[in-house]
Amino acid sequence: MKRFQSVFLLLALALAQSHDPQDPAQFSALPQGYSVRFQAAAGEVREAHLLQEGRAWPMARQLSLPGREVWRGVLPEARPYQIRLRTPEGERLLGPFLPPAHPFRALPWLEGRVGYQIFPDRFHNGDPSNDALALEHSEFRYNLVWQERGGPRPYLSRWEDPPGPMHCCHQYYGGDLQGILQNLPYLAELGVGLLYLNPIFLAGSAHGYDVHDPLRVAPHLGDEALLGELLRRAEALGIRVIFDFVPNHTGLGFFAFQDVVRRGPASPYWDWYFIRRYPFRPGDPTAYESWWGVASLPKLNTLNPEVQAYLFGVAEHWVRFGFRGVRVDAPLELLNAEAFFRELRLRLRAVDPEVYLVGEIWERAPRWVRGDTFDSLMNYALGRDIVLRYARGLHPALFGGPRALRELAEVYALYPEAAAAMGFNLVSSHDTSRLLSDLGGDLARARLALALLFALPGVPVVWQGEECGLLGEREPHDLQRRPIPWGACSEEMRGYVRALARLKREEPALRAGAFATHLAEGSLLSFWRGQGEGALLLAFNNGQAPEILPLPPGEWRDLLTGRRFLGQAEVPGVGVLYLKRASR
């Protein structure tokens, strides 16, 4: 028995020493300093300090997980340091450790920002005179299989028209850059500080991912001069804009693909694609490799150096033009994904050292945010797998407070704090049902989901119209992409989003990247944001009945309602509290 206990003790102490400054999850740079973390067996560390040049800084237990915990502290400088531990067996000194020469660094300008995603054709029609231009560049012009089979053609709709059979891709409503420009004051008033635009370049569909010319603004959306004005006006209002970059495939009208159609193996672009047989008819999915077998999206050969150079040049062009970040579509589909995106990061950071890079990866994938590829993923794994499931109010045994807090802790243990601070966090988008539809039309649960999303580290991203409390199922007709009926906006929901955005912008604890687990029981979920006297205690309840949260000493005030609490706080059914120590 003693031998077993000794082995267990050695394993526990070894786990307590599991700190590697070369691992971005354990050492990364925040605007407030350098985040240092280590993992230990649960209960094996009583106290910890960071030591640097004769000074000491306290570390605190940040995340509690089954059988283990994560401790965290912040250093002011990237100089050699040690970690002093107090354990039940006595004091231990770990290190010295040498910080990495170039730690993964969070971009300071993202702090406190709220994101907003726009699908241009369905946001607002600011210039009806350009609507018909969408039909001049439609996929129909290039898809010979579609032409031969007949059937419905692309068409224009009035803003209030219902979705038809072509709604996904070829029913145009006339939304454009002018419509976005006109609504910039609205977005600024809502609290938006980061704007993500779905593809705006010349393409063959309403969604724009079948790009025909990634260096030209789609004429039915506007032109380069209008885009430049949009970016300048947005910046003046404190809004930075990122664009959608599609490196995996093109549309049928892309110049290289059309050259292959005309000249076959003699084309200098033959090796830009994966052609199975020639001659072929564009639109035949058996003739060439395409994205998920969709014939309108022929796959690029990104192993080809010429293709790489072209794509890098496209991204560099638009960053030079004035975009402050890039959302990358389907990065895992590329054949040489890791090498490609390492090079893309280097090139874009050479153009703008603070460019923001987001990869469309839906699952937990920490290897993609280690400081050499993306700054963040599109965090569906956070927003839909945790936030949405908790907001649904399932039985606590299925997904109550303890399950939600454990999964949040797992996510934040996996990812560098720099990545968490830059998180592109969303519950809904153009590729999902609307939040309110996912929650069965329950506005209270939609508010709960948004409050939880806004409380987490990083940038909460609102899909266009969610602030209006709209419904829209993804299946079977992509109804989440219906044009926004601006006259039907819920002012109550819009005011709620404004209030959350104001707190995100003004509260230092919500701006920073620090997150720490607190208490979860039954339907109750609570965690800390920030440190010291300014820290916030966030509490959520996904059940119908009120829950009681014991409070640390002192008086606490809910930032959303102004209510004050002492000793304990009642968290309303399907409700939330943003608690801050009341001023003395």
Image (cartoon, rainbow, N blue to C red):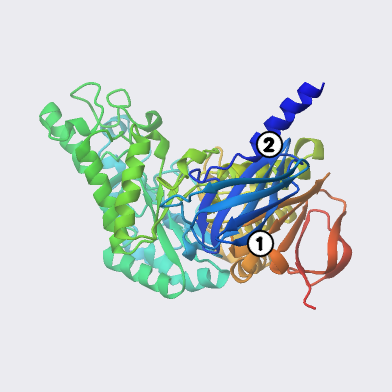
Q: Nearer the viewer, residue 368 or 450?
A: 368
Look at 64% across and 34% down and name the residue there: 14
Q: Residue at x 35, y 55 (%)?
A: 200
Amino acid of disc 1: Gly
- Dot 2 and dot 1 residues touching (CB under 8 Å): no
Residue 530 badge: 1
Left or right relative to 286: residue 373: right
Q: Position of residue 199 (x, y in %)?
A: 38, 51
Left or right side of 361 for 150: left
**Viewer can see residue 387:** yes
Compare marks 2 and 1 and give the one earlier in the sequence.
2
Residues at marks 2 and 1, CA–CA distance in whole angstroms: 29 Å
Residue at (47% x, 69% y) in the render: 183
Circle 2 — which element?
A: helix
Residue named by callout 2: 13
Q: Secondary structure at mark 1?
A: loop
269 vs 167, nearest the viewer: 269
Sort mark 2 into few (<14), some (14-19) or many (20+) by Cα contacts within 10 Å.
some
Residue 263 position within the rendered picture, expressed as x and y whole percent measured from the top left? 12, 31
> Is the C terminus in the top left, top right, bottom left or bottom right quadrant?
bottom right
User: Residue 264 sits in which quadrant?
Assistant: top left
Closer to us: mark 2 or mark 1?
2
Estimate the x, y position of residue 149 in percent, counting from the top left.
32, 30
Report the residue at 65% width, 50% height from top: 84
**Quadrant position of the N terminus in the picture:** top right
Is 291 in front, or is 173?
Answer: 291
Residue at the far left: name it: 266
What amino acid is labelled 2 in the image?
Leu
Residue 309 at x, y percent in the picture: 22, 44
The single residue placed furthest to the bottom in the displayed view is 584
Label 1: few (<14), some (14–19) or many (≥20) C-alpha neighbours in 10 Å: many
